[in-house]
């Protein structure tokens, strides 16, 4: 099919027309734990880059998200922590929102599905589809745990995936192969609460008739041949198998109640209800700004382009189920594009909150600013295949950013202050090198625009870095340190055009490393972020420049020691009389292998026959650990319960008196029998790193 010239973004750019409004969303993160780098790389950083770019184009764009606060993962987490689901989601929403803000993820609205407005909207949608015949009530078989005396929602059932054989499958999905499952399909099913084997029993639930939408979905997907292959291929697999009715209610006491008689004790299932959170969050945003009907321009006007950034494990929900629901409602905007990313792995294993294989955002931010990681994840983005994260890769990308972009800015700023009194010099006539430099900047601007509009964010980032390298080559070949003595006009020309390129790089890099580019703008005396100005001569002769500063620090091998130089032990000091002997010194790299985190003791149990030992259950934010601690001579069970502690979490598990201990609580010991648990600050949150 021939592409319309009117829809070509290059025409859009040249004639300066705002063709459409954009509504951009990222998958709602579960409020059952803190966020890790896999989350950031998959759905949030790419969306933020795209949104920041659109804002710089002065497009009409809103970026909407929120925490997903219902469903079985929430109730499981709350049970593990010994708190209510409401207390759990309140805790983790705050943690997630804080980490997003610190990483510069620039939502227009970050809401919660636990809000009354979302409840009302979800129930309205259910009743609308029920009335239209798209939802039906049916009897079904569901696993029941006789030991727990309850029907088991799908995530309370674990077992072996019938598709790939993974032993880590859940009753709703296999993360290893991405298959969406029914609990009854699992091989060797087990109750996730008590470990017993559940049995199928009859119960009643309400089902969404996905089969009624199959023909329409196939036609709708056929109209998007330009979508990423992983999205289309995944959907084709579903279509080939044939869509079936799917239960959209669960036996839980936490969630949006099913709003019909006879449905007591049942709630709307999260994969149906949470997808409506994009709409309810948009409604909340416009209500908060005093325009309660404004949401309709973004959800009911076909001119809106709905772009939904997700990970590949969410494809079926956004490319099949959500379009079916919105189409069933009638009149709602459907996804214009769904740029789903693959997985970011760590040492070949998927990042996972539930499995504890992660680099947590708050741990990273305790050591480093956000921009080096934003750049490292963008340049290594899992756009078309799984990619692997390592600290060596992070160090290399940090140093690349510092050596190429940071060094270029630093060189020209210092030179301008030293040679031209901190002002933009008046240039001589531009030569071939200068003309080529500015032409390359404009060409890069246009190429990067097309790449970002086409969701090739990684390639776009690489292209901007190539332009920064070109700037360094221009500076080196022009040799201003020589011409400053022999040809001041030529020197002024070099610095003038180098400053113009620095401003272009500031604009083009701004979606990727916004904090660094903001500081660059202050040095250049420029605040505006207009995409069209990249490659133009925006700085005028005589403009006063800001004070030079180092934008980015390089990291050497074993870079953790650089971060903690001020905490290095003073080996020359004599130990106080009576203090414990200093043990053999260890390399700093060995010490940094220890993973220490804040925990809260939730339960304390006796160990039969043990005079000094307690069995502790400790909340570490994203999971609960069992530890054995010799605290009985020093603390009562009541004194320990609810106490914040420091836990060494990556200690090899050991069995003590037949009880497995998965870590160690840390305490001080004066060598005279006085032992005291280390006490984190009162505002420390379970899972916070200890450094």
Image (spheres, grey):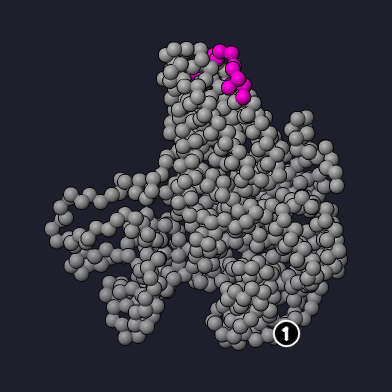
Taking 113 as reference, is 618 above or below it? Answer: below
Q: Return the x and y of residue 24 as percentages of the image width and height.
A: 69, 48
Label 1: which secondary element: strand
Q: Quadrant of residue 466?
A: top right
Residue 597 in the figure: left or right of residue 378: left
Q: How busy is the neighbourhood of tag 1: few (under 14 within 10 Å), some, or many (20 plus)?
A: few
The total of numbered circles placed on residues is 1
Residue shown at 47% from the left, 44% from the top: 398
Residue shown at 35% from the left, 67% from the top: 665
In the displayed orientation, state which residue is furthest to the left: 577
Q: Is residue 654 visible?
A: yes
Q: Dominant secondary structure of the magenta stretch?
A: loop
Residue for badge 1: 202
Residue 275 in the figure: left or right of residue 687: right
Q: Which of 431 and 166 is in front in this view?
A: 431
* Image quarter in which the C terminus is found: bottom left
Q: Return the x and y of residue 170 as percentages of the image width and height.
A: 62, 73
Q: Is residue 502 visible?
A: no
Q: In which quarter of the image is residue 289?
A: top right
Which residues are drawn in magenta? 421-436
Q: Return the x and y of residue 371 as percentages of the image width and height.
A: 51, 43
453 in the magenta segment: no
Q: Nearer the viewer, residue 67 or 86?
A: 67
Taking 515 as reference, is 220 above or below it? Answer: below
429 in the magenta segment: yes
Residue 315 in the figure: left or right of residue 551: right
Residue shown at 48% from the left, 49% from the top: 394
Residue shown at 46% from the left, 42% from the top: 399
Q: Return the x and y of residue 461 as percentages of the image width and height.
A: 59, 41
Residue 113 in the figure: left or right of residue 131: left
Q: Nearer the viewer, residue 193 or 393?
A: 393
């Amino acid at each position: 099919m021939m592409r319309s010239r009117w829809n070509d973004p290059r025409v859009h750019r040249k004639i300066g027309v705002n063709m459409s409004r954009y509504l951009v969303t990222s998958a709602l993160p579960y409020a059952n734990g803190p966020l890790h780098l896999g989350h950031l790389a998959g759905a949030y950083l790419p969306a933020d880059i795209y949104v920041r770019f659109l804002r710089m184009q002065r497009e009409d764009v809103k970026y909407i998200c929120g925490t997903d606060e219902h469903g079985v993962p929430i109730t499981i987490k709350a049970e593990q922590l010994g708190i209510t689901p409401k207390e759990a989601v309140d805790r983790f929403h705050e943690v997630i929102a804080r980490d997003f803000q610190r990483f510069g993820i620039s939502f227009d609205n970050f809401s919660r599905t636990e809000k009354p407005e979302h409840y009302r909207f979800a129930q309205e949608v259910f009743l609308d589809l029920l009335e239209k015949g798209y939802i039906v009530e049916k009897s079904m078989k569901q696993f029941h745990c006789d030991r727990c005396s309850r029907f088991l929602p799908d995530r309370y059932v674990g077992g072996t995936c019938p598709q790939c054989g993974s032993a880590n499958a859940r009753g709703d999905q296999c993360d290893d192969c991405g298959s969406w499952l029914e609990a009854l399909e699992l091989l060797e099913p087990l109750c996730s609460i008590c470990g017993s084997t559940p049995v199928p029993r009859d119960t009643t639930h309400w089902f969404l008739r996905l089969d009624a939408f199959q023909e329409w979905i196939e036609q709708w997907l056929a109209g998007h041949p330009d979508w990423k292959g992983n999205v289309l291929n995944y959907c084709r697999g579903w279509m080939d198998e044939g869509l079936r009715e799917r239960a959209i209610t669960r036996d839980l006491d936490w969630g949006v109640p099913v709003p019909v008689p006879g449905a007591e004790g049942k709630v709307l299932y999260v994969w149906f209800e949470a997808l409506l959170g994009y709409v309810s969050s948009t409604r909340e945003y416009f209500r908060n700004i005093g325009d309660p009907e404004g949401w309709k321009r973004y959800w009911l006007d076909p001119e809106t382009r709905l772009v939904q950034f997700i990970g590949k494990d969410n494809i079926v929900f956004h490319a099949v189920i959500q379009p079916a629901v919105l189409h069933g409602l009638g009149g709602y905007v459907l996804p214009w594009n769904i740029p789903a990313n693959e997985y970011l792995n760590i040492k070949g294993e998927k990042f996972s909150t539930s499995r504890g294989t992660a680099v947590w955002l708050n741990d990273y931010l305790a050591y480093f600013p956000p921009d080096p990681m934003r750049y490292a994840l963008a340049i290594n983005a899992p756009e078309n295949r799984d990619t692997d994260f390592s600290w060596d890769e992070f160090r290399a990308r940090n140093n690349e950013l510092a050596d190429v972009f940071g060094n270029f800015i630093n060189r020209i700023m210092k030179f301008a202050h030293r040679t031209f009194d901190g002002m933009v010099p008046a240039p001589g006539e531009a030569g071939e090198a200068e003309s080529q430099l500015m032409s390359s900047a404009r060409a890069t601007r246009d190429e990067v625009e097309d790449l970002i509009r086409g969701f090739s964010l990684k390639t776009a980032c690489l292209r901007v870095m190539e332009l920064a390298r070109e700037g360094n080559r221009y500076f080196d070949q022009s040799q201003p340190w020589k011409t400053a003595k022999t040809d001041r006009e030529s020197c002024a020309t070099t610095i003038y055009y180098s400053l113009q390129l620095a401003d272009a790089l500031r604009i083009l890099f701004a979606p990727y490393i916004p904090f660094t580019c903001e500081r660059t703008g202050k040095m250049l005396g420029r605040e505006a972020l207009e995409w069209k100005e990249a490659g133009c001569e925006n700085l005028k002769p005589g403009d006063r420049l800001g004070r030079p500063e180092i934008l980015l620090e390089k990291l050497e091998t074993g870079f953790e020691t650089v971060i903690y130089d001020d905490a290095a032990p003073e080996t020359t000091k004599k130990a106080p009389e009576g203090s414990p002997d200093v043990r053999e010194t260890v390399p700093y790299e060995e010490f940094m292998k220890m993973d220490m985190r804040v925990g809260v003791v939730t339960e304390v149990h006796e160990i039969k026959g043990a005079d000094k030992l307690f069995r502790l259950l400790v909340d570490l934010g994203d999971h609960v650990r069992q530890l054995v601690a010799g605290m009985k001579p020093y603390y009562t069970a009541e004194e320990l319960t609810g106490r914040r502690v420091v836990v060494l979490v990556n200690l090899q598990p050991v069995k003590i008196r037949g009880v497995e201990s998965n870590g160690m609580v840390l305490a001080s010991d004066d060598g005279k029998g006085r032992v005291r648990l280390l006490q984190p600050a009162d505002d420390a949150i379970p899972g916070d790193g200890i450094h």
